[in-house]
Amino acid sequence: MIRAYKAYCFDLDGTVYHGTKGVPEATLLIERLRAKGIEPYYITNNSSATLEQVQAKLASFGITTSPTYIMTSAIATAKYCKETYPNATVQMIGERGLEEALQAEGIEIVEENGDVVVMGIDHDLSYEKLAKASLAIRAGAKFIGTNGDKAIPTERGLLPGNGSLVKLVEYTTDVTPVIIGKPETIMLAYIQERSGVMKEEMVMIGDNYDTDILGGIRFGIDTIHLAGGVTSPMAIKNKDAQPTHLLNTFDDWQIE
C-alpha cells in the first residue's frame, strides 16, 4: 500500500504520456487525486515548451491544471537566475519556453556578452550561437544548463539532448555549468516552496531512474518508479539506492 501524500510530483514524458500518446491509467489516477481535493504537480526537464503548451498538451489527454502546478526546467532556470544573479543580463541558447520564462522574471535577454549564459535545447542551434556562448563564458559569464539530459526520445529514436550540447561548451571553455533539471534538486525545492509541504509529504513519480527517481532520492523524498518507460524494473534492481515503491502500472496504485 502506498501511503497518502500532499504533493504528488509527476514526470511527464514517459509517465503521463509517451510523446503524443497519453497514458490512460495516469489520467485516471490524476482524476482520482483531484476528486480527493489534491492537485498534482507536473515536472519536466523540457525547457522548450511554454506553460501554455504544457497546459494544452495535458488538456489533450483530459488533464486540466493551472500554471501554479507546472514546473519546467525553463521556469526553474529563470527563477534561479533572478534569485542568484539579480539585475544580470542573460545570453540564452534555447527556444520559446525558455525565452518566455526569462521574460516573465523580468530578465533582460541579450545576443552576446551576457552576464549569464543559459543553455536549453535549441533545434536551430548554430556554430555562431555556440561561439558567442563560449566567448561570453571565457570572458567571465556564469554558465547554466537547463538540464543535463544526454539524449531525448523521439519518433526517430534517441537524439542529442541538451546535456550533450552543454558538454560541448563545457569542454571548450573548461567551465562546469550549474545544472537545473532533474536529477538535481532545484525544481523539487521550488515545488516544496510553492506547496508549503514538508519533504515527508512529497513524492516524485517517474519512469526514468537517472532523472526522476534519483532526483527524488537526492532531495530526500519518497519516490515511485513506473515500469514501461526509460528504466526497466531489471535495471532498477541493480541500483544502489532503491525507489520507495515500484509500480508496473498506475492501475496497481490504490489511493488512500
Image: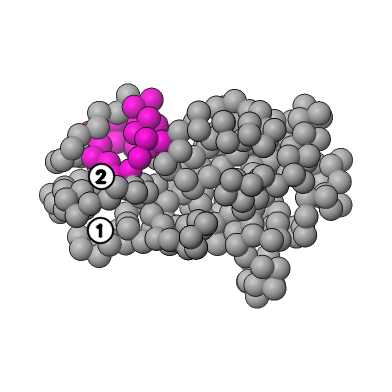
Please tell me which residue is depicted at 73% across the width and 39% down the height of the picture. 27
Colour scheme employed for the rendering of this structure: one colour
Crowding at label 2, few (<14), some or many (≥20) Cα neighbours within 10 Å? many
| Magenta-drawn segment | 79-104
Q: Is residue 80 left or right of residue 70?
A: left
Query: Going by the image, does 118 lie left or right of 114?
Result: right
Q: Answer yes or no: do the residues labelled 1 and 2 have beta carbons within 8 Å?
A: yes
**How far is the residue under mark 1 from the one under mark 2?**
11 Å
- In the picture shown, does residue 185 fall above or below 108? below
- Above or below, 70 relative to 254: above
Residue 15 coordinates in the image, percent (x, y): 65, 50
Q: Residue 195: x, y in percent?
A: 62, 31
**Residue nearest the viewer, comparing 92 with 81:** 92
Q: Residue at x 69, y 73 (%)?
A: 234
Earlier-in-chain disc, 1 versus 2: 2
Helix, strand or loop at label 1? It is: helix
Q: Residue 88, how many percent across, how many down?
A: 24, 33
| Residue 145 visible in the snapshot | yes
**93 vs 228: above or below:** above
- Left or right, residue 23 beside residue 99: right
Packing grade of label 1 (10 A; few <14, some 14-19, many >=20) is many
Q: Quadrant of residue 111?
A: top left
242 magenta-colored: no
Figure quadrant of the C terminus: top right
The residue wearing badge 1 is 169
Residue at x-position 81% and y-position 29%: 36
Q: Amino acid at mark 2?
A: Val
| In the foreground, 63 or 74 | 63
Q: Which residue bears the numbered disc 2?
A: 117
Amino acid type of the residue that numbered disc 1 sits on in the rendered structure: Val
